[in-house]
Image (cartoon, grey):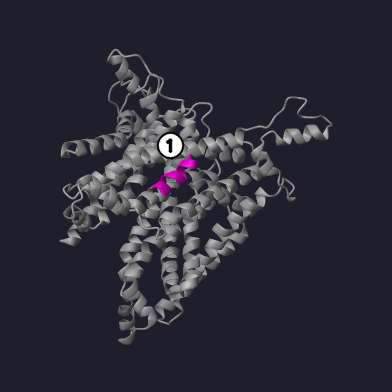
Amino acid sequence: MSKLAFPSWAVWLMALGFAGFIALVVLSIRQNKGIKRSLFAYPYGLWIVIFTIIPLFLIGYYAFTDKTGAFTLDNFKNFWDSNYDMHKQLAEMGHNPADLGITRGLVNVDTLIYSLWMAFLCTLICLGLGYPAALFMADRNFKLGSTLVILFIIPMWMNFLLRTIAWMSLLEDNGLINSLLTGLGLPKMRLMYNSQAVLLGMVYNYLPFMVFPIYNSLNKQDNRLSEAAMDLGADEMVTFLRVTVPLSLPGVVSGITMVFMPSVTTFFIPRVLGGGNTEMFGDLIERTFLSADNWNLGSALSLIMMVLILLSLTLLRKVDPEGEGGSTI
Amino acid sequence: MSKFLKRFYLVLILLFLYVPIVVLIVESFNAGVSRAKWEGFSLRWYNDLFNSPAIINALYVTVSIAFLAAFFATILGTLAAIGIHAMKKRPQSIMMTLTNIPMTMPDIVTAISLMLLFIFTKLHRGYFTMLLAHITFNIPYVILSVMPKLKQMNKFSYEAALDLGATPGYALRKVVIPYVMPGVITGALLSFTLSLDDFTISYFTTSPLVQNLSTLIYSEARKGIKPTMNALSALMFIALLILLLLVNRRASMNND
């Protein structure tokens, strides 16, 4: 029905190898011959090597080479200064770029800083909105907690792109919110095509990822602990601050991880809800790869992204070494 | 804080989450094309939906990939979980670290790394590469759903089966696999929904000729989405809701 792209013979061979291995496993189970059970993980091991490890090395390879495949650091210099190539060409032609008034291009670095800032704000807002929500849901007197979890999951089934586009109908100049405002005799507001709209879209998409882990860790808490604190004379506020909150920190940490990581690399949301100067790092990577066709620079940008994420993960691991909080789904 | 205020807050948060979805569904019944103006109730977009080959084709690609990816990921992932569980401590922790890589990497990095792999191996990007990519990001979720079940399992029940004369293969089939089945099913459902909703990874690993619903929406987003898309997503939303209700009823019936 669809136009299938036919893979080369090597891929078919690989597929055959996998099918063969699985057949072997099934056969050995059927024939009741004991094979070593750790063997079962081998196809997956091979899969990881081909589809996770080699691809990650490829990013590194492209990041440190130029179009001809020769080793270079130019991609990183291009990240630091988006006019770097121009400088180089001018210098080769015998001009002095400084005389021509061409200075360092800041597009890439600025986009990275802007993305980190937006992701930080998004995480902060999600935490501010999500923590009370999780707290009220985990309340012992509140019986609907688990139903609410499902109610938080259901919106995520609607295609993420369509949900973001739906915000357009609400925020547009002639959208629902503005018609409501004019209906009440109030002036119209410009709600779309700015950073706030992008932030709204991000919070909307990532809020559930903050609520779930916090709810989980609050729900797991032994109620007797806070009761003990009260018995020992702590009032409600002190109990909350010194018992409940510290015990929920693992959930908070994994919530922060689950919101911050995807926020930095958000793409699409800024394109739909944002204006001209709200490009984020994800959009930049996509544009560099697919519009500018510069895989080498694109790989360098992805590598920088990866390093940043790994750094922040190691930092967060220090707070939550067990990786507890976890996700509910 | 009073009980009322707490509930009110939760209602507000839920409103925030649901308003766009309600808007989306209402728009799908709007007779006019304009997003903002209500021009009367109509089913014309639902009618258009079934006469739009691009959308039907994208639906076919989405659902078939989700199904196939969930199927292969569940088999590979379950086998892997059993294998990893039986490993010695060191290789086990190495495998789990490797499993966590794709889950901690942002989607866009996974997507790009896979795209580079397909470019490097000169594989034409299309249906097949999208399927490979989906299997790849699904397997870790299956492993992480099956692993806790394996850890919970009393290891002596497997040994007891062997002592009672079962061969390792028989014990695996009759003792281990039935025990971890709930984890396997969770993993499969999770894979299916993740791949149904995926955009970033599909976008980088397919060509414009083979589109799933997400990439189709993306390519149309700049031209302006037609309410036909809303109609489709409303239908899919309702279908998933019904599925959830059925699964829940089955679960509660089993509990009784």
Please state the chain letter of the residue tagged with numbered disc 1 in the rendered image: A
Quick check: A276 above or below A159?
above
Label 1 belongs to which residue?
A121
The percent coordinates of residue A174 (x first, y second) are: 38, 19
- The reply, left or right, for residue A312 in relation to residue B165 is right
Magenta segment: A256-266
Residue B227 in view, yes or no: no
The three-letter amino acid code for the residue at tag 1 is Leu
The percent coordinates of residue A84 (x first, y second) are: 71, 36
Quick check: A230 above or below B45?
below
- The reply, left or right, for residue A51 in relation to residue B44 is right
Quick check: A25 above or below A34?
above
Residue A174 in view, yes or no: yes
Q: Which of A157 and A87 is in front in this view?
A: A87
Quick check: A89 above or below A325?
above
* Residue sitting farthest toward the front: A233
Q: Which of B198 and B33 is in front in this view?
A: B198
Most common secondary structure along the magenta stretch: helix
Res A228 → quadrant: bottom left
